[in-house]
Image: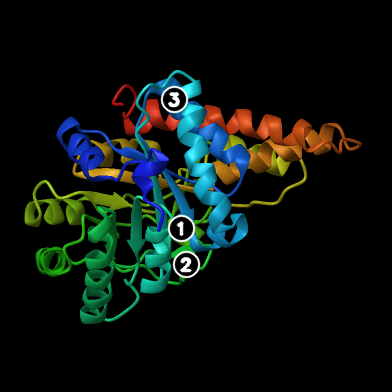
Amino acid sequence: MVSYKDLGLVNTREMFKKAINGGYAIPAFNFNNMEQLQAIIKASAETKSPVILQVSKGARNYANQTLLRYMAQGAVEYAKELGWENPQICLHLDHGDSFELCKSCVDFGFSSVMIDASSLPYEENIALTKKVVEYAHQYDVTVEAELGVLAGVEDEVQAEESHYTKPEEVIDFATRTGCDSLAISIGTSHGAYKFKPEQCTRDPKTGRLVPPPLAFDVLDAIMEKLPGFPIVLHGSSSVPQEYVDMINQYGGKLPDAVGIPEEQLRKAAASAVCKINIDSDSRLAFTAAVRKVFWEKPGEFDPRKYCGPARDLMTELYKHKIINVLGSDGKA
């Protein structure tokens, strides 16, 4: 058993409380490799923003659970090296799909886990979530649950259609499960293709897709039912068109990739939404930078020469999200 407290990590309880009261959201950035982790910590340390390091089941298998533990511990020490005296860093399992996986993460030093049983019938979702909560809370590990289904694809998570969270269910669900935060569905979705072209309109000037607005009426109804309760938005990458354009310019093929407009995320961050998940944007930044190097220098084979620029571009992206979208800079 490894305690996250021994690794210098924190859970999300105080983070979320401060975020709700302060009208901002905590960035939850997924990472799969060293460069992503370096970029997240550098951006967070330079902006003094609390941050959630997210690891999916697929990323955990990719990186190895033992290495992840030491990477998280190293991230805390790296933050201190960068001058962040009291780093507020959480290590979170994203979309845990079983009690066994969540338990393993708790035992290996995660400070927060998500149990995503949203695809199960309502009562089964409650039962599985409650089981995870009861185990995790023994070790002061916070638990995120999900009600409603997001469309799109992210690692092992895949759904053809979204189903908005039903506001009338949230009080019963939160009370019976004891979860610490709740991921809801209000129109965000996973991946770089968050909406089909037929769901969007096209900007007549640029020809780019314009996605439909988020269902803020559903969010308002949920906030009315659960005042002050931490709400989470998944699938909230904005899919920056400059990265999509770079990828396409340098040999890639991402037609009609579209995300969530940042102004809508800013609006959500000012509400009870205190955690906003961002994954695809960093993948796009990484890929754009790597493609540019390979296109301009096809003889390059030193990974530092293409992963380094990718790391720099991701750092810029994370700082932009922290300062201009989520408003979490200076909060840690």
Q: Please give left or right for residue 12 compared with residue 68 in the image.
A: left
The first of marks 2 and 3 along the sequence is: 3
Which x, y percent locates residue 55? Answer: 48, 53
Task: Mark 1 and mark 3 in contact? Answer it, CB < 8 Å.
Answer: no
Q: Which mark is residue 190?
A: 1
Give the vertical position of 148 relative to 306 (above or below).
below
Task: Mark 2 and mark 1 in contact? Answer it, CB < 8 Å.
Answer: yes
Q: Quadrant of the C terminus?
A: top left
Residue to which mark 3 is pinned = 45
Q: Residue at x 62, y 33 (%)?
A: 311
Give the vertical position of 261 relative to 133 (above or below).
above
Residue to which mark 2 is pinned = 157
Task: Give the SS element for disc 2.
Answer: strand
Between 175 and 268, the residue placed more toward the observer is 175
Q: Which mark is residue 55?
A: none
Q: Quadrant of the N terminus?
A: bottom left
